[in-house]
Amino acid sequence: MAVPTNFPRGLTGDSGVKQGLYEVSTVEQGPIGSVLRNTYDGSEYVYAYFAGACGPGKIAAMDASVSIQTSFDGAFVDSGGSAKDTYAAGDKLIYVKNSTITSDDVKNVWAGGYLMITDAGGEGHKYFILSHEAGGDTQTNTVGLNIEPGLAVALVSEGSAMIVGHPYNNLAIANNGTDDVVRGITLVDVAAEEYAWVQRRGPGVVLADETAGTVAAGTIAVLSDGVNGAAEPLNIAAINSEDDFSLLNFAEPVIGTFLTVAVDTEYVAIDIKIGG
């Protein structure tokens, strides 16, 4: 596919996405996660689906409440939710059970992501999730995952697992002061249940939060701990006693480098460096 004409000059990549860089769509126009690169300035753009709204120039992150099942024990069951110790190497349909897997977890919400074995038999392995049905009800709390490749080793029912969905599926505005996994900066106003591009590399623009310190050119930008979707400078609070060590601002994810000074609550130029 040729790069659409409404893309900036220099963008390359046969992404298969038939949607302009500054467009949104309620219908998927190509593979989620497709990447386009700009040969002039090193910019990178990734095609994504949004579970929540995110305005232009704001940081988008994986919606963990949708995309992630953190490590859970006694993970492996049969289709009815009973413990199962007979998953063997090569098996490709694996049922898992967790109290937070419910019918709210729609069909294929984790497709394109991974089943990761976190403890006991098979620990350290990850498997690509091809597809799955909707999550179980409050009685079974199970879901059957179709994985590739098949299991490398057998599993035991008391083993632990986690599920991580596709990194560019189900994005939303990044929550301030959290450990959200940031994915990019939006280019346009995106509503929930829309597809759009996010920028993860190169010169861009982002909402500035100066409440944690003054933004200066060349300084490191991190996710704001006070404003959703904004960037603030990496900062170190004054240390007057051991109790102040908790104030060190090393907890937020790095977004890139500020290119200029900023005005609080306005938007500022940034050299984006997120993932990829």
Image: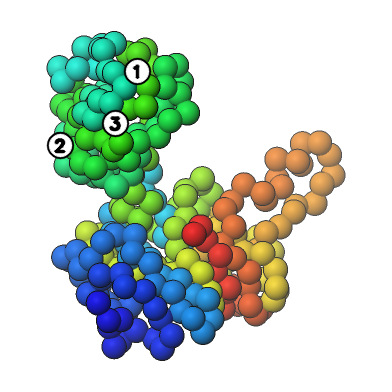
Residue 64 falls left or right of residue 40: left
Label whose residue precedes the other's in the sequence (1 or 2) = 2
Tag 3, which secondary structure? Answer: loop
Question: In this orientation, does residue 142 appear?
Answer: yes
Image height check: is 28 above or below 62?
A: below
Nearest the viewer among 149 and 226 is 149
> In the rendered image, which residue does mark 1 sit on?
155
Residue 6 falls left or right of residue 105: right
Q: Amino acid at mark 1?
A: Leu
Image height check: is 1 above or below 191?
A: below
**In x, y percent, where is residue 34?**
33, 64
Question: In this orientation, does residue 160 appear?
Answer: no
| CA neighbours of label 3 inside 10 A, class few (<14), some (14 to 19), many (20+) | some
> In the rendered image, which residue does mark 2 sit on?
133
Image height check: is 201 above or below 166?
A: below
Nearest the viewer among 91 and 209 is 91
Residue found 67% across the figure and 71% down from its top: 215
Residue found 70% across the figure and 68% down from its top: 219
The label on residue 90 is: none
Tag 2, which secondary structure? Answer: loop
**In x, y percent, where is residue 1?**
25, 77
Quarter of the view holding residue 87: top left
Question: Do tag 2 and tag 3 residues touch (Cβ < 8 Å)?
Answer: no
Tag 1, which secondary structure? Answer: loop
> In the rendered image, which residue does mark 3 sit on?
150
